[in-house]
Image (cartoon, rainbow, N blue to C red):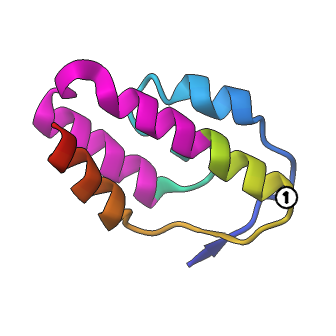
Amino acid sequence: MPTSTPHAVSAGTAAILSLIPGAGHFYLGLPIRGATYLVIALMTCNVGGFGFVIWGIDAFVLAKRMNEGEDVKDKFPLWDVLFFWLLS
């Protein structure tokens, strides 16, 4: 489902909010991604804190893309989940 942002979003705010798993993505209006990251963090107890880095970068990049007018889709980030599990 395509998501569009009627106003500019702050990439920095999205990245900082990602210290709370999923919060940066909820801020961007991407609840499926946000909920996915939250569940992963709860299930793994966020082993090593590595997830915060990945999710912060993801939220930052998505905010930049949204501000540039790109159509960002709110989808289940399967590749991100597999990548996280392989590194944990």
Q: Residue at x 49, y 30 (%)?
A: 18
Which quarter of the image is occupied by the N terminus?
Answer: bottom right
Q: Please provide percent x and percent y for residue 62.
A: 65, 52
Q: Please provide percent x and percent y for residue 20.
A: 42, 25
Which quarter of the image is occupied by the C terminus?
Answer: top left
Res 27 visible: no
Instruction: Check the image and report above or below for 50 versus 67.
Output: above
* Prevailing SS of the magenta stretch: helix
Res 51 visible: yes
Q: Indicate whether residue 55 is drawn in magenta.
A: yes
Left-right relation of 73 to 87: right
**Nearer the observer, 83 or 31:** 83
Q: Please provide percent x and percent y for residue 30.
A: 54, 56
Q: Residue at x 44, y 29 (%)?
A: 53
Quadrant of the image occupied by residue 57: top right
- The residue under label 1 is 6
Instruction: Check the image and report above or below for 32 versus 43.
Output: below
Q: Residue at x 48, y 55 (%)?
A: 31
* Numbered range of the magenta stretch: 32-59
Left-right relation of 42 to 23: left
**Nearer the observer, 47 or 10:** 47
